[in-house]
Image (cartoon, rainbow, N blue to C red):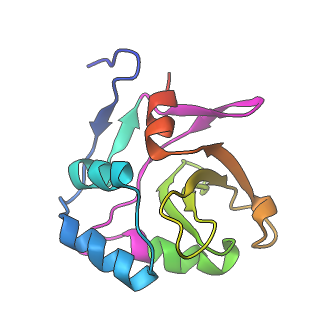
């Protein structure tokens, strides 16, 4: 099965999730996920996009390996991942996807009232939790998805 330009095929979906599960996570973290990401998670929880390559400015070839599962019944889910790396992340940074090398694609909120976080790449080899460990990918999740290529 192949995808045309900007057509993403989501493979290997995990346990389905509903809006209520996402709302519980949002309430616990006191954030609001962007609606485009929320819809993608509901329909493609834990899945891998194909194609899945994205570029950072002047640095091509990064891999969007898969969404983190948001279903608490899955072996590894969003809250597990967040708890494992929270102390190493800059404040108000939340992973929602990973690459095959232990890095994460994250939402970066400017403050607690922000409802339009930017999409950033977090390098797990970063020494500290400063914003220097982040590289901006794009402004929205939809921008990220539309930029994926082979």
> Quick one: quadrant of the N terminus?
top left
Taking the image as drawn, is residue 70 in sight? Answer: yes
Q: Is residue 75 above or below residue 101?
A: below
Q: Is residue 77 left or right of residue 55?
A: left
In terms of depth relative to the viewer, which is nearer, 120 or 31?
A: 31
Magenta highlight on residue 127: no
The answer to whether one can see residue 74 in this image is no
Out of 147 and 9, give the one closest to the viewer. Answer: 147
Horizontal and vertical percent for residue 5?
40, 16
Picture coordinates of residue 93, whole percent (x, y): 59, 68
Location of residue 27 with respect to 128 vertically, above or below: below
Q: How many marks?
A: 0
Task: Work out which residue is located at the far bottom of the displayed protein and give it.
Answer: 28
Q: Residue at x 40, y 63 (%)?
A: 33
Horizontal side, residue 40 vs residue 108: left or right: left
Instruction: Name the residue at 81% across, 60% down.
Output: 132
Residue at 37% in and 69% down:
76
Q: Quadrant of residue 22?
A: bottom left
Q: Within the magenta stretch, is there residue 77?
A: yes
Q: Is residue 18 above or below residue 35?
A: below
For the view shown, which residue lies furthest in the front direction?
113
Where in the figure is residue 4, as x and y percent of width and height?
35, 15
What residue span does the magenta drawing correspond to? 51-79
Q: Position of residue 68 (x, y in %)?
A: 40, 59
Q: Residue at x 50, y 38 (%)?
A: 144
Question: Could you say which quadrant of the image residue 19 lies in?
Answer: bottom left
């Amino acid at each position: 099965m192949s995808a045309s330009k900007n057509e993403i095929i989501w493979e290997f979906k995990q346990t389905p999730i509903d809006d209520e599960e996402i709302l519980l996570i949002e309430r616990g973290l006191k954030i609001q996920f962007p609606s485009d990401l929320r819809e993608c998670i509901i329909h493609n929880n834990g899945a891998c996009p194909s194609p899945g390559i994205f570029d950072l400015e002047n640095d091509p070839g990064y891999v969007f390996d898969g969404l983190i599962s948001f279903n608490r019944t899955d072996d590894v889910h969003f809250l597990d991942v967040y708890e494992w790396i929270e102390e190493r992340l800059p404040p108000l940074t939340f992973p929602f996807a990973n690459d095959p090398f232990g890095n994460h694609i994250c939402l970066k909120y400017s403050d607690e009232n922000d409802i339009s976080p930017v999409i950033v790449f977090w390098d797990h080899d970063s020494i500290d939790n400063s914003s220097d460990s982040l590289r901006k990918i794009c402004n929205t999740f939809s921008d990220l998805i539309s930029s994926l290529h082979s």
